[in-house]
Amino acid sequence: MGKPAEDLATFLGTTAVGTAGTNIFVQVPERKLGSGVQVPGDDIVGVIPFGGDTIKSMGGVVAWEIYNFQIQIRNVDLGEAEAKAYQVMQAVDGVTKVEVNGTELNYMTIIRAPFILPPDDKERFRYALEVQYWRRPEGQGLP
């Protein structure tokens, strides 16, 4: 199984949003886009993990792993930043049972719709949205 943030970045790279490692990057929570992060380019998507949970079966076995992410979009054009945020939302909301990097992502949903953030230190516009995805622990496969 892959790392959750990398799996989501790779999934976004399979859509028209961009390419993982080129303009889609995984960021650690304390290094969000616009907070001194030196990610080159003016059209960037950052996948930032911020928590999650597990759901256990009645027998105490972990049945689901749940991951939360903030996805930040940075662009020199406000309209393009907003459009990309909504493109990301459409790409992930309601996706079920896809395989990415050998990981089966069972369900993805939006937990906070796109919202605007303050510009970064170079006056580039930023949007963000929050996404949650569920997957089965390794070895359990798709239901």
Image (cartoon, helix red, strand yellow):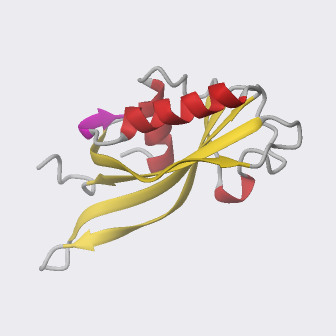
Would you identify the image quadrant in which residue 81 lies? Answer: top right
Task: Specify the farthest residue to the front.
Answer: 79
**Is 143 a magenta residue?**
no
Residue 63 position, x and y percent, is: 21, 65
Residue 82 higher or lower than 128, as above or below: above
- Chief SS of the magenta region: strand
Q: Which residue is drawn at 28% across and 39% down?
A: 95
Residue 4 position, x and y percent, is: 44, 49
Residue 77 higher or lower than 126, as above or below: above
Determine if residue 141 is in view: yes
Q: What residue span does the magenta drawing correspond to?
A: 96-100
Q: Residue at x 35, y 46 (%)?
A: 1
Residue 56 position, x and y percent, is: 22, 74
Determine if residue 71 is in view: no
Horizontal side of residue 128 vs 120, given as left or right: left
* Tally of numbered discs: 0
Q: Residue at x 82, y 43 (%)?
A: 120
Residue 88 higher or lower than 63, as above or below: above
Horizontal side of residue 70 vs 101, given as left or right: right
Horizontal side of residue 79 vs 8, given as left or right: right
In the depicted view, which residue is nearer to us: 38 or 127?
127
Task: Specify the farthest residue to the right.
Answer: 122
Would you identify the image quadrant in which residue 137 lies? Answer: bottom left
In the depicted view, which residue is nearer to us: 125 or 103?
125
Residue 26 position, x and y percent, is: 60, 42
Q: Residue at x 50, y 41 (%)?
A: 6
In the depicted view, which residue is nearer to us: 127 or 38?
127
